[in-house]
């Protein structure tokens, strides 16, 4: 029987034309055989309020449910002030609360980022990896996907045209598929 890895992907930007939202859209199209990427828009998630963590808003309940149903998580994060933007951190806070109800626990994860700078979001990725330690997640170490000078990496339709970045995304997603199977002891998909 075929085992398909279900990945939940979300971008830490609310801007419609965000390069990271475009990066996520391209990742969906580049998903390897044996993987399905479902995306979630973080826009409906309100600012975290600990008074509501035991009875969270509907968007938060949906988000946590999708995380739990996924075999792996794909974080696509911009960089803001050397870290992940507030939108990403806010979503993580909701999904990992209340204490003892962390939807991310033991999930394999991959990270991608795009930036108009030449760093490609590297510092945000490294900070996100620190956050994942507390979340008890299993992030992939390599390949690292950081798309620098993002304004030049996409065409006017939002298609990623940088061949090296496309290749790295394909490698990252294949590695996430294999990493998830390894961690879950899932049998390999027979693509033959």
Image (tube, rainbow, N blue to C red):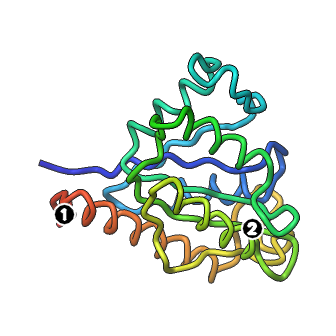
Residue drawn at 80 percent across, 48 percent down: 86
Q: Secondary structure at mark 1?
A: loop
Classed neighbour count for the residue bearing mark 2: other residues with Cα under 10 Å, few (<14), some (14–19), many (≥20): many
Q: Dot 1, how many residues are within 10 Å of its Cα: few (below 14), some (14-19), or many (20+)? A: some
In the foreground, 74 or 188: 74
Find disc 1 in the rendering and name its residue.
188
User: In the rendered view, would you say 66 is above or below 180?
Assistant: above
Q: Position of residue 131 (x, y in %)?
A: 61, 59
Q: In the image, what residue occupies the spot 49% across and 80% down?
A: 142
| Residue at 54% in and 53% down | 28
Q: Give above or below for 106 relative to 52.
A: below
What count of labels does the image hold?
A: 2
Instruction: Give the quadrant of the C terminus.
Output: bottom left
177 displayed left or right of 67 = left
Residue 187 higher or lower than 40, as above or below:
below
Name above or below for residue 91 compared with residue 30.
above
Q: Position of residue 109 (x, y in %)?
A: 47, 60
Dot placed on the residue nearer the N-terminal end, 2 or 1: 2
Which residue is pictured at 84% across the width and 82% down the height? 118
- Residue situated in front as seen by the camera: 178 or 32: 178
The foreground one among 143 and 94 is 94
Residue at the disc numbered 2: 114
Residue 60 in percent (x, y) is at 61, 27
């Amino acid at each position: 029987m075929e085992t398909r890895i279900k990945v939940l992907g979300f971008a830490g930007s609310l801007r419609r034309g965000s390069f990271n939202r475009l990066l996520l859209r391209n990742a969906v199209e580049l998903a390897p055989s044996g993987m399905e990427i479902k995306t979630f828009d973080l826009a409906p998630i309100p600012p975290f309020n600990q008074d509501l963590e035991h009875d969270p808003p509907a968007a938060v309940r949906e988000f946590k449910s999708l995380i739990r149903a996924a075999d792996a998580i794909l974080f696509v994060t911009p960089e803001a002030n050397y870290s992940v933007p507030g939108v990403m951190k806010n979503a993580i806070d909701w999904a990992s609360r209340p204490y003892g109800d962390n939807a991310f626990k033991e999930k394999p994860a991959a990270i991608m980022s795009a930036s108009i700078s030449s760093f490609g979001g590297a510092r945000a990725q490294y900070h996100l990896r620190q956050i994942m330690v507390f979340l008890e997640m299993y992030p992939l170490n390599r390949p690292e996907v950081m798309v620098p000078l993002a304004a030049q990496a996409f065409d006017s339709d939002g298609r990623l045209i940088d061949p090296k970045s496309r290749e790295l995304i394909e490698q990252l997603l294949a590695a996430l598929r294999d990493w998830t199977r390894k961690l879950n002891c899932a049998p390999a998909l027979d693509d033959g």
